[in-house]
Image (tube, rainbow, N blue to C red):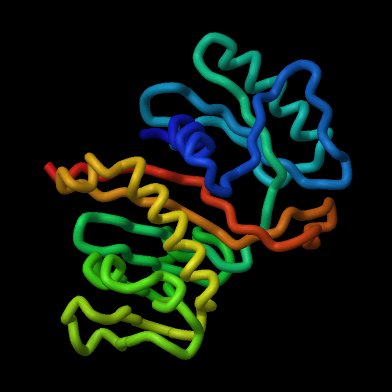
Amino acid sequence: MNKFMGFYELKSLNIPTVPWKLFSADTVLEPQLLWTVRVATEAGNDLHLPRAVGVEAEEACLKARMFAEEFRNKGIVIYYPYFIAEKSGVLDMNSERTVIEAVDKDLWNLVTYGRKDVTVIIPAGYMQSMDTDMMMHAGTGPYDSCGAQNGQALCFTGNEAFMAPEELRELLGYGSVIRGRFRDDINGGGSILAEWSYAYSTDISHQPVGDRYLVFYELRGISGR
């Protein structure tokens, strides 16, 4: 699943995702915000396709028109407000457990530089045996620092206070939605990875605008066969 298909899949799941739209000749962008425009293709590897990230509206429109001309019969051009992340991470789900890895600010710090503020492992049996709200309620629940891998506790490595209980609860709730959609893949031994951030839109001075929000922006499967 490439980024293009991942965007469509996330949108169809009705979980918070990048508010992307198709660029057209009639598109008008809000001049007080920064924007990202990128090329997407329906099939194949789309990791190195052209994009412009965090640019002002005029430049975003110029780049988008150039991309649309170059990829007229080979792809589409999408756009969405540029955001800055407060914290980011990966939700990794298979039949035995869910793993949440989180890092301060941009996901780039995790996937490129290998930095990590906390890893939380939630065994499948633990999730099935306890009510999620009780499990994640602040100050309660059998938290463990990974000394005992008995399937009965959340296992933390790193800064346990980095993720608030309500953030973990929210991520696991949407993780359940993703699990349901890809049940056959997971039961067949595969894993599903979802990348996420708690983020803010930004103005042209790179200052946060509006309320913080959760956004998923990458979804891909890893075959277990």
Q: Quadrant of the C terminus?
A: top left
Residue at the spot 64% in from the left edge and 36% down from the top edge: 20
Q: Please tell me how many numbered marks the rendered image carries.
A: 0
Can you say whether 220 is above or below 23 in the image? below
Residue 70, horizontal then vertical, whole percent: 60, 16
Residue at 40 percent of width and 67 percent of height: 101
Drawn side of residue 187 relative to residue 133, left or right: left
Is 149 on the left or on the right of 17, as rendered? left
Residue that protrudes farthest toward the left in the picture: 225
Q: In the picture, which quadrant includes the N terminus?
A: top left
Task: State the image coordinates of residue 32 (x, y, percent, origin top left).
Answer: 88, 46
Taking 175 as reference, is 214 left or right? right
Up-down relation of residue 81 to residue 85 (above or below)? above
Q: Position of residue 153 (x, y in %)?
A: 28, 81
Q: Position of residue 151 (x, y in %)?
A: 20, 76
The one nearer the camera, 90 or 70, is 90
Relative to 36, say whether 173 is above or below.
below
Regarding residue 164, the answer to whether it shows in the image is yes
Vertically, is 112 above or below 42? below
Q: Residue at x 50, y 59 (%)?
A: 108
Can residue 48 be seen here? The reply is no
Residue farthest toward the right in the current orientation of the protein: 32
Which residue is found at the position 45% from the left and 59% from the top? 173
User: Which residue is at the front of the view, 61 or 184?
Assistant: 184
